[in-house]
Amino acid sequence: MLAEASAQEGFTARPTSLPTSSFMNPVCSFLPRFALIFIFLTAPLSGCTTFDGLKQIRHLPKTAEAINYDPKNPDFFYDQSVRAYRRMSKQQQNGQPHLEAVVRDTLGKKVRQEEELLALSDTGLSRTFGPSRTAVMGGGFLLGVGIFVAQVILLFPCALALGVVGEVLGIPALPVSSHLETVYLEEAQRAYDRGREQLAAGSPESALASWDHAEQLMPSLQALSDMNFWRGQAFDSLSEPRSALLAYSTFLDYSESSLPSYFKANFADDPTWEWKADHAESRIADLSRRLARNGSLVTFSSEQREERP
């Protein structure tokens, strides 16, 4: 009887363990997939398009942290080579001071004047908001939390559905983002290079269209390339002084390098960024005088762009 009971118990115990194992295996493989898809869906709303740092590559650099600027004890210095302020570095690289990132405002524009640096600092914020500064910053934090919660509520069903479909069809989630990053980079490089070649071949309008396409793919090219300098050259050749003035001004206000690190240098005889900056300043002065003489000089910011037919 005991053997029969134990055999019966053993017989009844085995079926209960098999469904648990078969149920846990798909769940364990589904959860990582669901997490990746959910991150992939929420990332664009957070300002990031794919993984692997594409947020920094694709989007225009902006101020990333609070600035404590004191004119009596400055932590920043004006770097003439990029016509903007940098943070003082305490690190060394190959025996030379390590260059920190260029200081930019919340719109990505380079900080080129001490007054702009002071306005970004805690002192400037305190002057602007006064006693309500803490309340304003707290409100901004709560708004960010609210936006994230809204993303979770809206995108959770989408991530769940995509996770189930991907699990059933066996589609990998992570390689999609890496492939998308490669596509953006390669197409942006091709559009930039095509514009340079078209300008050299005497087709400035085609070059401008190519650079517009490149900037749509990679807005950070405004800050990390010399694209707006070449736009100024194109508008110069088209005898459009106002558009050329705006392009040169945008180049000086945003650009800090001739090419981003993720581009191949396909133009061996390219002038240095400093030469382009000097030439842009010279052209701005010449164009401003010409427009003022003709009575058509208007004030504008580099955030504006003249619409072309």
Image (tube, grey):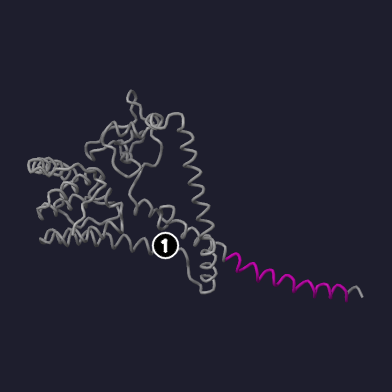
Q: Which element type, helix, strand or loop, lies under badge 1? A: helix
- The residue beneath circle 1 is 177
Q: Indicate the position of residue 301 as horizontal and vertical percent values.
A: 24, 43
Q: Residue at x 22, y 61 (%)?
A: 210
Query: Which sits in the foreground, 248 or 175?
Result: 248
Please state if 73 lies on the left or on the right of 189 as rendered: right
Please state if 143 lies on the left or on the right of 286 as rendered: right
Q: Indicate the position of residue 1 as horizontal and vertical percent values.
A: 92, 75
- The secondary structure making up most of the magenta span is helix
Q: Residue at x 34, y 47 (%)?
A: 61
Identify the residue at the far top of this view: 72
Q: Indicate the position of residue 97 as horizontal and vertical percent values.
A: 31, 35
Q: Quadrant of residue 197?
A: bottom left
The C terminus - image quarter: bottom left
Please state if 160 lies on the left or on the right of 116 as rendered: right
User: 68 above or below 148?
Assistant: above
Per the image, is 171 magenta?
Answer: no
Q: Indicate the position of residue 13 as horizontal and vertical percent values.
A: 78, 71
Q: Quadrant of residue 85?
A: top left
Identify the residue at the far front of this view: 295
Identify the residue at the far right of this view: 1
Segment tinted magenta in the rendering? 4-29
Going by the numbered disc 1, the residue's amino acid type is: Ser
